[in-house]
Image (cartoon, rainbow, N blue to C red):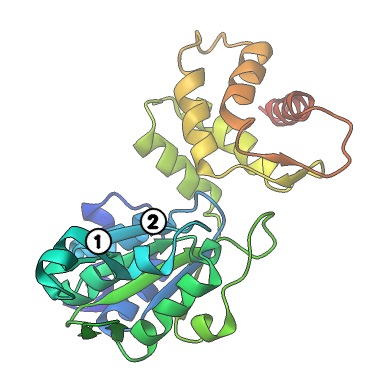
């Protein structure tokens, strides 16, 4: 099967709207045996793409969420003390971590927000990425079986609270960038994934959410998740008699946790959302 046919099949099977270009890159990385780093803002579908590709190729999918408390031993594995006392330093007394499991079974190790992992934990990945093997102290070498792949994600460096992956680690990945999708594609996503069926309502919802992304008072706008939440909330009002205040109230519920105000702004998050709703609805 050709790559374009694989992409179309994944889109159809897993209800992925658009993303042909990015999906093609992730598929090619898998076929070529390359580890992939997917970069994009929160909520653009990084995990969905990785899981869909893993499912298409019938691979196990082991997930790790980046966390400063996620140590090297949690990633590679630990020895079970009672078993060590009973059997010694053997494979029977070793409890493999997600990296070791993925290597032994030829699975995909998905690391969400890999740039949040401690530097020491990141370093454990280097030999797995570079030589497809790691060394377990007291036991020996674990080699990556056919199909083993690491897919990692990170948010853009300009996001507050994010750090960058070390250069040595980034050098071992191929890079796939995910931007926000087109307005038409976002409408299709909301129509497909929300419980709102009214096209005019969906247009308003998507327009409001997209406006948050380049609004002067906001450091960070909402992803399509905000549109899904807003669509699911606003549908309970008596459309088409839904009032401006209904929209404001619903938008505050859906978006207040998904956007960030610019530093030093004297307005409240509710005031900014009210402004955005008024600005957008004025065009309808």
Residue 50 image offset from top left, x and y in percent: 34, 62
Task: Please give the name of the residue rendered at 29% of the width and 76% of the height, measured from the top-left corner.
Answer: 149
Location of residue 70 with respect to 257 vertically, above or below: below
Disc 1: CA contacts within 10 A as few (<14), some (14-19) or many (>=20): many
As drawn, which residue projects farthest toward the front?
85
Task: Please give the name of the residue rendered at 53% of the width and 13% of the height, measured from the top-left corner.
Answer: 240
For the question of whether residue 178 can be seen, the reply is no
Disc 2: CA contacts within 10 A as few (<14), some (14-19) or many (>=20): some
Q: Nearer the viewer, mark 2 or mark 1?
A: 1
Q: Secondary structure at mark 2?
A: helix
Task: Please give the name of the residue rendered at 20% of the width and 78% of the height, measured from the top-left corner.
Answer: 147
From the viewer's perspective, is 272 left or right of 108?
right
Viewer-proximal residue, 253 or 184?
253
State the image quarter where residue 56 is shown.
bottom left
Viewer-proximal residue, 38 or 10?
38
Task: Determine which of the numbered discs, if any, sits on residue 61 in the image.
Answer: 1
For the question of whether residue 48 can be seen, the reply is yes
Location of residue 262 with respect to 141 vertically, above or below: above
Residue 22 image offset from top left, x and y in percent: 42, 68
Task: Determine which of the numbered discs, if any, sits on residue 274 in the image.
Answer: none
Check disc 2 and report the residue beneath it. Answer: 47
From the viewer's perspective, is 185 left or right of 250?
left
Task: Please give the name of the residue rendered at 36% of the width and 63% of the height, measured from the top-left corner.
Answer: 74
Location of residue 134 with respect to 49 vertically, above or below: below
State the image quarter where residue 247 is shown.
top right
Q: Secondary structure at mark 1?
A: strand
State the image quarter where residue 12 is shown.
bottom left
Location of residue 125 with respect to 132 vertically, above or below: above
Viewer-proximal residue, 37 or 94?
94
Residue 198 image offset from top left, x and y in percent: 43, 25
Q: Earlier in the sequence, mark 2 or mark 1?
A: 2
């Amino acid at each position: 099967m050709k790559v374009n046919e694989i992409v179309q099949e994944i889109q159809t099977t897993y209800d992925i709207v658009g993303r042909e270009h990015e999906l093609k890159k992730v598929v090619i990385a898998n076929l070529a045996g390359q580890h992939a780093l997917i970069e994009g803002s929160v909520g653009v579908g990084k995990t969905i793409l990785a899981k869909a590709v893993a499912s298409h190729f019938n691979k196990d999918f082991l997930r790790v969420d980046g966390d400063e408390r996620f140590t090297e031993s949690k990633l590679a594995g630990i020895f079970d003390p009672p078993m060590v006392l009973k059997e010694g330093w053997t494979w029977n007394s070793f409890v493999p971590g997600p990296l070791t499991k993925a290597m032994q079974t030829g699975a995909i190790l998905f690391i969400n927000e890999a740039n949040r992992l401690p530097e020491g934990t990141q370093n454990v990945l280097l030999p797995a990425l570079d030589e497809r093997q790691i060394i377990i102290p007291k036991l020996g070498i674990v080699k990556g079986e056919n199909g083993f792949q690491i897919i990692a994600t990170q948010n853009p460096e300009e996001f507050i609270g994010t750090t960058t992956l070390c250069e040595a680690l980034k050098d071992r990945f191929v890079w796939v960038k995910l931007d926000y999708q087109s307005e038409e594609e976002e409408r299709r996503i909301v129509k497909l994934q929300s419980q709102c069926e009214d096209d005019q309502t969906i247009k308003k919802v998507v327009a409001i959410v997209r406006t948050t992304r380049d609004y002067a008072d906001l450091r960070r706008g909402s992803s399509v998740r905000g549109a899904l939440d807003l669509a699911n909330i606003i549908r309970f009002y008596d459309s088409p008699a839904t009032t401006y205040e209904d929209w404001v109230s619903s938008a505050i519920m859906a978006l207040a946790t998904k956007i960030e105000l610019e530093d030093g702004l004297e307005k409240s998050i509710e005031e900014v959302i009210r402004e955005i709703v008024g600005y957008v609805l004025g065009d309808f």
